[in-house]
Each structure stands twice: as structure tokens, then as C-alpha cells.
Image (spheres, grey):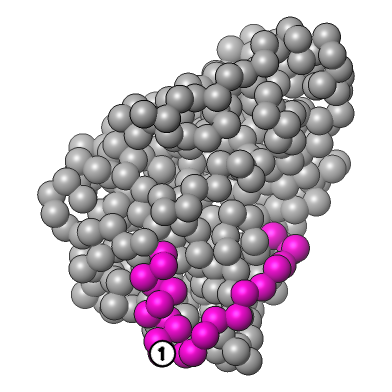
Amino acid sequence: MQRAPERTPLTDLLRHGFIPAQESIVDSYGRAFTYLRVSVTDLCNLRCVYCMPEEGMKWMPRDEILSFEEIVTVIEAAAACGVYKIRLTGGEPLVRSDIAVLTRMVARVPGITDLALTTNGTRLAELANDLASAGLRRINISLDTMDPVKFKAIARRHELHEVLEGIQAAHAAGLRPVKINMVVLGGLNDEEVADFAAMTLDQAIDVRFIEYMPLEEAKGCAMGSGNFSFVPNQISKERIAARFGELEPLEVGDGMQGPAEVFQIQGAAGRLGFISAMSAPFCKLCDRLRLTASGELRSCLLDGGGLSLKPLLRNGGSRQDIIAAFRTSAYQKPEVHTDWANIPAASMSRIGG
Ligand code: SAM
């Protein structure tokens, strides 16, 4: 069994000045945090088989969810120590009322220069313009199939048409880049990877192929019941190359890259990203913290530990207290995640994917 690497005690790091007093949040392995993913709700209007059970989800009580003001207080504290990139997510962020109002509030936080949002796209046709004028720049839209029958099988709802309209609306509203996230599921949608790649030929759309991650709530309802199998991204890459020829590797510095390996079909307008969390984990490059809808700070998607900011936010904690909580959370971040036996008993949607 692989052993977790030794950590340097926090007190020693502080004494040796390794963690700068105020400027940035650095963990005990030297990773600086510049990116905060903010889940604005745990609610979702789809029930994707790889994410949550069809029935029986326990939603957070309304008063447990952070208010817009509380979210912005956390983001201001993050911005004060070097975070410049925010992604609003969920659950489904577009089912939260007045999401464009929150978007505007976040866009105005000094220091936040990169504001993105991840959505299932079902409400995007009505909201894309408001979001763009509120200051949203980039958008990721989850779409796992272009076949209405398969869409119903994966998302357990009939909303493919709305998502496709949402993609067009995002384009028309000037959001750039528009990225499509496809979770590749063997036996459900893996035959479509080359069709998805074809979307990049003429349109400036980026498509990212995501490996399924067996988070606990999904495991019980999907893989466990034999609905689909895991597909490593290498297989998807080979399928795409078999149709379009060898893929050209790209080095990009505009936020497309993140943890993705980026390629392009020769002469295509858009790009292809491969996010291989299972077959090629990228923990060493991970520069993100997560804030759940109920105000828990998590330094690792797969690590059970979280630190609740709610007591600080609701009992008069100062910005310095919040920053101290960021540092503690960052310090708790494992160098790599190896303990698959103890992944959190929660879906990506509850933590904030
Ligand atoms: N509702 C929004 C959406 O659908 O994009 C945002 C939240 S969703 C949890 C964020 C992303 O996580 C989506 O692209 C979804 O496909 C992905 N996701 C959810 N569960 C996953 C899992 N078990 N493995 C890999 N990706 C997953």
C-alpha cells in the first residue's frame, strides 16, 4: 500500500516563513491556491446516473445554504490572499433564484479576474444573456449524449433539447470559451466520443472528456448496479484519432488547460480536453479549494475532511478568521489522494463538481 507523504508541521512552516503572512495561500507541499470553486446550491433538476440516485436525495435545509452576502464575504477573503479565479457550480447553479445577481456581485469583487460557471445547460437559454451582462466570462456545459433516448437514460429527464438551445444561447451571448463536459460511460455514451469531437471541427467549442469517478453516492446507484463501465481516456483518444487522424497536442494558457491534456483535430476550430482523474491523477497540479453550498471548505474533492465557515460567517468572524480557515484547510490538503477506500459519502453535486 502506498504511504501518505510526511507533512511539515504548520508551526514550522510559519516559523520559517514558508507561508507568506498575508499574500497567498500555500499548502504544505508548496501549491499556491488561486482558484475557488463555489457551490451555490446542492439542488439539481437532473438525476444523472453517475452522480446521484433517482430518488431519495436528502437536500440541505434552506437556512443551511449560504446567502449571497455570505458567499461574497468568503470570496472577498479569498481574493485578499491571491485567489483570482472563481467557478460557480452546484448542484445546478442555474436553479438558484437570482443567480445573475450573485454573478454580478462576484464579478465586482476586486481581484476576481476570471469568473466561470458550470451548468447542465437546461436553463441557459433564458439566462445566458443576463449572466453575460452580469460579468460571467466562461461557461462549461455538461452534455453526455446527443441522443434523446440516451439522454433520458443518463439524466433521467427529457431535457436534451433545452441543453442544445442553451449551448447556442451561450455562444450568442458571447461567453467564451464554451466548453462541453462529457463524462464517458462505457455502454451508455462511449460510442459517441468521436461525434462529440466532431463538434469542434467548425465551431469554436471545446469538448472535454471526463473519466467517471466512483464517488460514494454515485457508486451505489450506477456502476454498482452494472449500468455502465469505466472507460479510460486513452480509449476515447484512440477512438477519436481513428476517425480524424492523429491529434495535435496543444499547450494553452487560457484556462482551457486546467488539469486537462489538450489536443486539436488538425484544422479544427475548437479543442479537445481529456480529464483523466482516474487513469492519470493530477493532484500535484491541483490549485483549487472548494466551498460547498452549506459553507464547508474542502481542499480535496476526494478527501472526507471539511472545515465549516458558517460559524465564522454567522457569528461575527472577521476576514482574518476566514483567511486563517483557508490556511488550515489548505494545510489539510493531501499531496495526492490515494485512499479510495475512504472517499466521501457524497456525490459530486453535493460537494460542488
Ligand atoms: N449541475 C452542473 C453540471 O451539470 O455541470 C454542475 C455540477 S456537476 C456535479 C459538475 C460536473 O461534475 C459535471 O460535468 C458532471 O458531469 C461531473 N460529474 C458528476 N459526477 C461525476 C462523477 N462521478 N465522475 C465524473 N464526473 C462527474
**In this orientation, which residue lies closer to the viewer: 326 or 136?**
326
Question: Amino acid type of disc 1?
Answer: Arg
Which residue is at the far left? 225
Q: Nearer the viewer, residue 136 or 101?
A: 136
The local secondary structure at tag 1 comes to helix
Residue identified by numbered label 1: 243
Residue 125 image position (x, y, % from top left)? 51, 70
The residue shown at (29%, 52%) is 50
Residue 338 at what x, y percent from top left? Answer: 43, 34
Give yes or no for residue 219 being in the magenta stretch. Answer: no
Magenta-drawn segment: 233-255
Front-most of residues 243 and 313:
243
User: Would you identify the image quadrant in which residue 26 lies?
Assistant: top right
Q: Is mark 1 within 8 Å of ligand 1?
A: no
Within 10 angstroms of label 1, few (less than 14), some, or many (20 or more) residues?
Answer: few
Q: Residue at x 35, y 34 (%)?
A: 340
- Residue 88 seen in render: yes
The answer to which quarter of the image holds residue 131 is bottom right
- The percent coordinates of residue 139 (x first, y second) are 60, 62
User: Quick check: 303 left or right of 56?
Assistant: right
Q: Position of residue 65 (x, y in %)?
A: 50, 29
Q: Is residue 129 visible?
A: no
The residue located at (28%, 44%) in the rendering is 218
Q: Is residue 25 left or right of residue 40?
A: right
Residue at 42% across / 30% down in the picture? 2
Residue 245 counted in the magenta span: yes
Looking at the picture, tell me which residue is in the foreground, 96 or 106.
106
* 19 over 190 or under it: above or below: above
Tag count: 1
Q: Is residue 167 left or right of residue 101?
A: left
Q: Is residue 58 left or right of residue 288?
A: left
Q: Quadrant of the N terminus?
A: top left
